Each structure stands twice: as C-alpha cells, then as structure tokens.
Image (spheres, grey):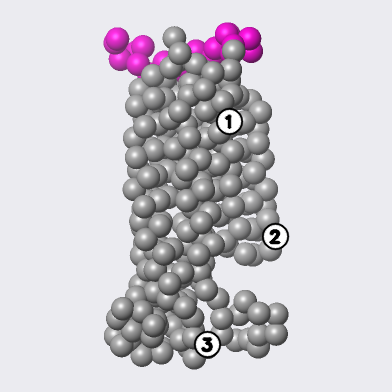
Amino acid sequence: MNETTALSPPTPSTAEPGASSRFTAWPLSISVCGLLGIVALLLEGRPDSSSDFDYPVTAEHVLGLDHVPYRLSGALGYVLALLLIATAAIWRHRVERRFPGSIGAIVVSYGAVATAALVTLAYGWRGAVGNYLPSGAEGDTFDADGIYNYFVLTDFSPYIAFIPLLASAYGLAWMAFRERLVSRRLGGLAALLATALLLATFVTGVPGLPSMIIVGLVVAGVWLAFGRSTITMADHR
C-alpha cells in the first residue's frame, strides 16, 4: 500500500443497508466504560444533599462526610482511566488501522485518551478526599481548611473530566454522515446528545452537564456490538 492509498478517504459501504446483524464483542468495552463512569461519578457524599441544608458549605460541613464513597470512587476512576486507554487501543486496532483515511475515527480515540488523562486527575482528588477525611486512613494529615480545599477540587472536576468525549461523539457523527462507517442513526443520536449537552451548559452555566455523555457510551457500545456498521462488518468477512 503506497502513501496515497493509505491517506485516501474511506470508501462508503454499499453493503451496509442490506447487511445482516451480527454480534461483535469488542465494542462492548465502550459500554463498560460508560457504566463504570456512571458508578464512579455517582459515588460521592455531599453535605448539602438534604433539602433543608443552609448554604454556604463550610469546612465543618465537609468534615462530617463519609470517606468510603470517595475512596471507592477514586479507585473506580483509576480503573476507568486504564479501561479508556485499553478501549482506545482496541479502537485503533479494529477501526483506525482498517480505515486509515477516517478522520472521525481518529477524533473518537483522541477524545477517549484525553478523557483518561482528566479522569486520572479528577478521581485521584476524590480518592484523596476519602483518604484525608477524619474517618479516612490519613485523617490526621490536614486540618479542616486543607480537607475543604480537596473537597472543592472534587466539586465539578469528576464531571468536567468527561468533556473530551463530546469530541468523540462528533467524531462518530462524522464517521456516520461523511464516511459512512457507522450507522447514521447512531451518528445522529451522538451529535444530538453532544449538542444538547453543550447548549444546556451554555444556557444554565452548569459546567458538569456534559458528563452525561457517558450515558451515550453505554448506548454506542451496545449499538455497535449488535447493530449494522461497516467498522464491525469487517470483522465478519
């Protein structure tokens, strides 16, 4: 294969509309990333969780948090970071190398790797909160203000960490409508979800809303595993 051939755009599949649906296992790693992300994201304790809480949150409020959810969230976040990197490697092997002209496929993997880096930081801070709370293993390390600073770091960072996956969603849409490598319905839903989350963030000013893109990971992985897409049809040739 010469350089010109390697850089040529992927050829749309003419067999896709009539292809039979066959199960392909590897896309399910995408769904596992989504499920693990949801669990890790929801594992937290908040002093303002009750309806009768009086703002603002203070260091004294934070000291009463249970350290266990933060410890678990931090550990699961690390596992998620590793799984995202592994999934990006699988994607590169199964998709990028088979369709070297696909810009969308590259964007998908870039978004996963960038998310892995941010998840490592954000959930490392969550684990630190669990470690330094009074009930944690090193509860005597920092005073109330020090623990409060760690808590503030975890207020939105575990949510913000998933923002690069919006780029992956748009990459999937490009693969669907420009390169014809995945289902157009899947690509359309990916673009719609990413755009809706961005617009909601702009309107409300809440920076953590794009994190809900991880729900889309669950759907995308299952869709690719059981649905009709050129990138998985190649596995059955």
Mark toward the viewer: 1 or 2: 1
**Quadrant holding the N terminus:** top left
Q: Is residue 139 rendered magenta in the image?
A: no
The residue tagged with tag 2: helix, strand or loop?
Answer: helix
The residue tagged with tag 3: helix, strand or loop?
Answer: helix
Badge 3: how crowded within 10 Å, few (<14), some, or many (20+)?
A: some
The chief SS type of the magenta part is: loop
Q: Quadrant of residue 3?
A: top left
Measured as percent of width and height from the top left, residue 20 is found at: 59, 13
Q: Which residue is mark 1?
A: 223
Identify the magenta region: 1-19
Q: Is residue 80 visible?
A: yes
Q: Residue at x 64, y 44 (%)?
A: 193
Q: Is residue 228 left or right of residue 127?
A: right
Q: Which residue is mark 2?
A: 203
The residue tagged with tag 1: helix, strand or loop?
Answer: helix
Q: Is residue 197 left or right of residue 95?
A: right
At label 1, which amino acid type do we have? Answer: Trp
Q: Residue at x 41, y 20 (%)?
A: 99
Cα separation, mark 1 vs mark 2, equals 30 Å
Q: Nearer the viewer, residue 158 or 21?
A: 21
Q: Which mark is residue 61?
A: 3
Label 1 vs 2, first from the N-terminus: 2
Cα separation, mark 3 vs mark 1, equals 44 Å
At label 2, which amino acid type do we have? Answer: Val
Q: Nearer the viewer, residue 177 or 45?
A: 45
Badge 2: how crowded within 10 Å, few (<14), some, or many (20+)?
A: few
Measured as percent of width and height from the top left, residue 68 is found at: 43, 72
Q: Nearer the viewer, residue 203 or 94?
A: 94
